[in-house]
Amino acid sequence: MEQNQMKKREKLLFAWGDVFGGGAQSLIGVLYLIFLTDVIGLNPALGATAILISKVWDAISDPLMGVISDNTRTKFGRRRPYIFVGGLLMVIVFALMWLPTGGWQSDVAKAIYALATYLLYSTVATVISVPYSSLSAEITTNVKERNNVNVIRLVVSTVATAVCTLIPSMILELFKAGTITISVFYLIVGVGFGLFFALPLVLIGLFTKERVTIPEKLSTFDVKTFVKPLKVKAFRGLVYMYLCQSISMDILATGIIYYAIYVAKGSSTIFLGTFIGVQLLMFPLINYLVNKVDKKKIYTFGLPLAIVAFILVGLYPSDWPIIGAYALVALTALGFAGAQLMSWIIFPDAVDVGELKLGERATGSFSGIMTFIRKTSSAVAIQIFGIMLAVSKYVRPSELVPIPLQPESAILGIRIAMTGSFVIMMTIGYIVGKKYVLTNHRSLQVRKFLGLRETGTLDHLDAELEAEYTELKKQLF
């Protein structure tokens, strides 16, 4: 039996690093578009387009970073140096991203600045995220310990999501009410959260370990290298599931503040707190089930509830008691919790399949695709909302009217953009998840045959093992 390799403090330190993965993306998804439209005063279509354009760079930088980190050879490992340096840079780029430019007269100048600073952020985030998510599959070779570490990591990520959505939404509410100035807003969001994200990353770079055997062969960055992970059937299925889950989450996060302010006339903080609080309550159950029930079942089980509940959120009349909308959001969170957590729990298992098929553990390339999806999903969500706000005649706030009365067309646009996109993506996610091929039993089989390869006996199997291996390849490769 594989022995535990990590001390508790290393587990907690590594998990702490996902305050960036969960927190920064959530903060940006919830706050950045409304920061550009309602604080900076930028046209919503321009703001969303600036964010989307930066993702073109992500299309190159994420897989490129995967190959770079795969090929890195230092006495500190392949992943940790990038996490350390990226953590230091994050303080600077995050502060630049939230610099108040509302006094600028030109929308074009504001959009160019937003594009330039978001490009900087995306680059540094890539330097951090791809090695960090790769390290999640390499920080231990014990499968159960790896599952446990990643569940702890996702607990931290969800707590960070709570902190990085609730506090910024409260700060935005205080700013719109005139209680705090733009300078205070900037110091808390731009400077304070930048430091909050950077500290654990620097410590991970200094005090964690990488425990898998580093292959001698180096890889090259080309189209074949980029698409190589997508040749693995089990990984392709995970990509589809993750894409649906992450876009759905970012759609909800981006839209809920607009929905709270202009449609439901409630508190975005309560909406977000309810959603995240319910997910946190689900963690102990999911942690208990993750080694006992197929992970894809955990992903799909509650989705019908989430889909139906969120349809009702979108249809909920503005003049009905707000408590009903809060309750429907809670039901959505209850059904969505499994899907929200499972993709990164499954990820190391999918990397194992890739190693068995491809003969190398190119975790960085697999991670590059996953982090590209995560960041692109945020851009897609923001772009959907930006365009919908622009075409539905959304009225931008001003100093004199911080919460303007929106026309019915804008109210309808917010409902459709948020609810329709979520329901479509999670319906697809449910269908894909039901068909996913990598079960817990097959994951154990993969680890068994990887062990046989390490001992040099994979090419000399008896008839029974050969039949088992052939069937496994048919299902997963």
Image (spheres, rainbow, N blue to C red):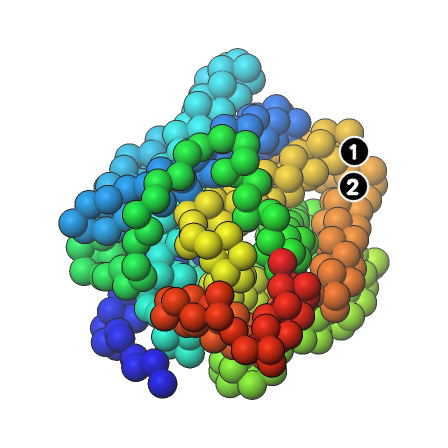
Residue that label 2 marks: 413
Identity of the residue drawn at 83% across and 38% down: 409
2 or 1: tag closer to the N-terminus: 1
Q: Is residue 130 left or right of residue 260?
A: left
Residue 348 at least partly seen = yes
Identity of the residue drawn at 54% across and 78% down: 462
Give the percent coordinates (x, y) of residue 167. 44, 56
Q: CA distance from mark 2 to mark 1?
A: 6 Å
Crowdedness of circle 2 by 10 Å Cα count: few (<14), some, many (20+)?
many
The quarter of the displayed image where residue 224 is located: top right
Give the percent coordinates (x, y) of residue 330. 65, 71
The local secondary structure at tag 1 comes to loop
Identity of the residue drawn at 57% across and 40% down: 227
Pick the front one: 318 or 449 = 449
Q: Is residue 77 left or right of residue 426?
A: left
* Disc 1 residue type (three-letter): Ser
Crowdedness of circle 1 by 10 Å Cα count: few (<14), some, many (20+)?
some
Asked whether the beta carbons under mark 2 and mark 1 sit within 8 Å of each other, the answer is: yes
Q: Is residue 289 left or right of residue 248?
A: left
Residue that label 1 marks: 392
In which quadrant will I find the N terminus?
A: bottom left
* Disc 2 residue type (three-letter): Gly
Q: Is residue 194 above or below residue 312?
A: above
The local secondary structure at tag 2 comes to helix
Identity of the residue drawn at 24% across and 44% down: 73
Q: Is residue 145 above or below residue 416?
A: below
The quarter of the displayed image where residue 156 is located: bottom left
